[in-house]
């Protein structure tokens, strides 16, 4: 059930049999959630964290003018709100973008992990730091990257993150069941602008996004357009 989460951990760190069992023992309720449902609302008190098993989720904030800004996408294997363990509430909402399967982890079980498994505690501390690094990179995109570089960077990032959990296919392809409007909310662009950029990338033979699928035809050129440096994803194995 949590194989993709374990793959994400093992891509960067070792995990003992005992630690894996501790994670499995901490799991709570499994739920299937339809697309477009707010799973966590800003400022509600939280006593459990949510682990995404399948589908896509996002963190977002709505503005009074009706605009929405997505601040991070979550892929299978991600905790959507591990930081709620210490914060106890979020200042943003979390929504399903596609049909999702989630499992909750009660905070009391996370407390037990921190008391009994110091290495596993460091792994999850690293996970929240990784989320922060992704947020910073998104801030750079929103503040300084051109429209085409924003799109290219997001496609590069998602390829790496999905590859780690076994969700890419040969030829640089992966599923991304988002509308152009949802992409625009990730990128801080209008849907019209996103459409124009996607057409430009397709005509250049770099990447095609169609039918909920990204096909990267020229990875080197896509990385060049994005100025993509994956170091912020901390892919190297970590010391125990």
Image (spheres, rainbow, N blue to C red):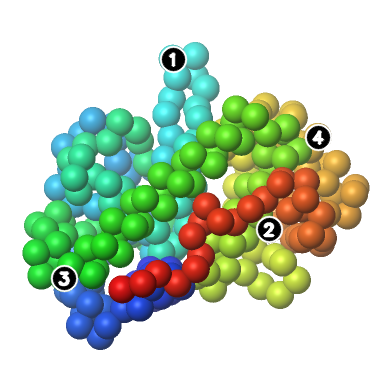
Looking at the image, residue 46 sits to the left or right of residue 5; the answer is left
Q: In the image, which is nearer the foreground, mark 4 or mark 3?
A: 3
**Callout 4: 10 Å neighbours few (<14), some, many (20+)?**
some
For mark 2, what is the residue?
A: 213
Disc on the earlier residue, 4 or 3: 3
Disc on the earlier residue, 2 or 3: 3
Q: Residue 231 is drawn in which quadrant?
A: bottom right
Up/down of 183 relative to 128, above or below: above
Q: Position of residue 192 (x, y in %)?
A: 74, 29
Q: Position of residue 160 (x, y in %)?
A: 59, 62
Disc on the earlier residue, 2 or 4: 4
**How far is the residue under mark 1 from the one under mark 4?**
27 Å
Q: Position of residue 56 (x, y in %)?
A: 48, 53
Up/down of 43 relative to 96, above or below: above
Disc on the earlier residue, 1 or 4: 1
Up/down of 232 relative to 27, above or below: above
**How far is the residue under mark 2 from the one under mark 4?**
18 Å
Kindly tell me whether residue 134 is visible in this rendering: yes
**How far is the residue under mark 1 from the one under mark 3?**
44 Å
**How far is the residue under mark 1 from the one under mark 2?**
32 Å
Under circle 1, the secondary element is loop
Kindly tell me whether residue 35 is visible in this rendering: no
Q: Nearer the viewer, residue 167 or 228?
A: 228
Under circle 3, the secondary element is loop
For mark 3, what is the residue?
A: 117
Q: Residue at x 46, y 46 (%)?
A: 133
Q: Residue 208 is drawn in which quadrant?
A: bottom right
Under circle 4, the secondary element is helix
Under circle 2, the secondary element is strand
Q: Residue at x 90, y 49 (%)?
A: 204
């Amino acid at each position: 059930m949590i194989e993709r989460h374990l793959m994400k951990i093992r891509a960067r760190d070792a995990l003992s049999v005992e630690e894996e069992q501790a994670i499995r023992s901490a799991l709570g309720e499994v739920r299937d959630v339809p697309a477009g449902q707010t799973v966590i609302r800003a400022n509600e008190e939280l006593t459990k964290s949510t682990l995404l098993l399948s589908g896509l989720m996002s963190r977002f904030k709505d503005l009074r003018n009706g605009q929405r800004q997505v601040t991070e996408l979550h892929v299978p294997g991600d905790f959507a709100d591990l930081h709620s363990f210490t914060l106890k509430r979020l200042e943003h909402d979390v929504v399903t973008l596609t049909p999702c399967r989630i499992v909750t982890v009660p905070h009391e079980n996370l407390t037990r992990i921190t008391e009994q498994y110091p290495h596993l505690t460091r792994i999850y501390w690293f996970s929240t730091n990784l989320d922060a690094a992704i947020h910073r990179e998104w801030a750079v995109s929103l503040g300084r990257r051109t429209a085409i570089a924003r799109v290219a960077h997001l496609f590069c990032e998602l390829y790496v993150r999905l590859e780690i959990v076994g969700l890419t296919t040969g030829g640089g392809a992966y599923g991304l069941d988002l509308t152009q409007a949802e992409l625009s909310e990730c990128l801080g662009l209008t849907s019209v602008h996103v459409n124009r950029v996607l057409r430009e990338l397709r005509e250049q033979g770099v990447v095609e996004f169609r039918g909920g699928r990204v096909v990267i035809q020229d990875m080197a050129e896509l990385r060049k357009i994005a100025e993509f440096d994956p170091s912020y994803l901390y892919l190297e194995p970590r010391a125990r």
